[in-house]
Amino acid sequence: MDIALFIVIIAVASILQTSTGFGFSILATPFLLLLFEPKEAIQINLILSLVISMVLIRNIYHDIDFGIVKRFTVGSAVGLPMGMMIFLALDIVKLKLVVSVIILVLTVLLILKFRMNQTKGRDLGVGGISGVLTTSIGMPGPPLLLYFSGTDTKKETLRATTLAFYLFIYLASLLIQVFAAGTNMKVWMSSGLALPLVFVGMYAGQKLFYWVNPQLFRVFTYLILLFTGIYLLIGNL
């Protein structure tokens, strides 16, 4: 394992997660796949993302839309087992290509200012898609980001509501992954080594959250998503 690359991935992804509410899995998973087997990369991402959500949620619970979280959770209960079946069926190259296409399609829709009205039915559907993506590729964030951006949700509500949902979906996905695909000591040792970097990144991201204005927030999001998607696509074609 390239220790230097691992440090950069975890630190930058932690900053992005804390400052935006969605960035850890979107940034970390594609690059962790360069260093670890798919099962290991996804499980490390799930463990660290769960820790981040647990630490952050106590300070921002007042911004949570609990109705949306409930509907996301109900929807994801259907998607989680479906995602696990997809994970077990795909090889590593196909898995990376799926990740890259999802990220690029999401980014294009965001740049084109995709819009939709929020409904209870769509909340359930987005939760289901997020469940599929979490157990299959360790990335619940893309459908949530697109949905919240499309409904002009405030960044405070976006961050808090997604983190609250992550508490459930990351834990459920980790349990399903461990049960269905197994785990090993490398996953847990690497996660333990990454924790100090996660906490440093969280501190920096919390400061950045209050400094970044909405326009810069969106531009930074697009750049990160485009870079990650293109990098993965080119590397696996």
Image (tube, rainbow, N blue to C red):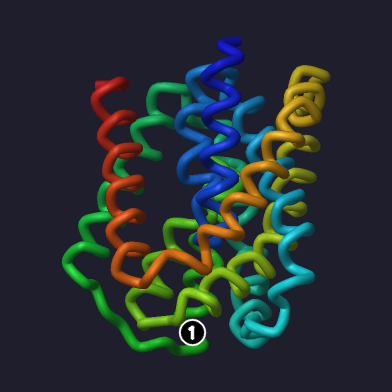
Q: Residue at x 56, y 16 (%)?
A: 4
Q: Quadrant of the N terminus?
A: top right
Please say if 132 is above or below 157. Answer: above
- Amino acid type, callout 1: Gly
Q: Is residue 175 above or below residue 128?
A: above
In the rendered image, residue 62, in percent from the top left (x then y), is placed at: 70, 84
x, y percent for residue 183: 78, 26
The residue lying at 79 percent from left, 70 percent from top is 58
Q: Is residue 142 left or right of residue 71?
A: left
Q: Quadrant of residue 219?
A: bottom left
Residue 231 horizontal/vertical position (percent): 30, 29
* Local secondary structure at mark 1: helix
Q: Residue at x 47, y 28 (%)?
A: 31
Q: In which quadrant will I find the C terminus?
A: top left
Residue under label 1: 121
Furthest residue in direction left, as rendered: 112
Toward which corner of the image does residue 57 lie, by quadrant? bottom right
Residue 5 position, x and y percent, is 52, 19
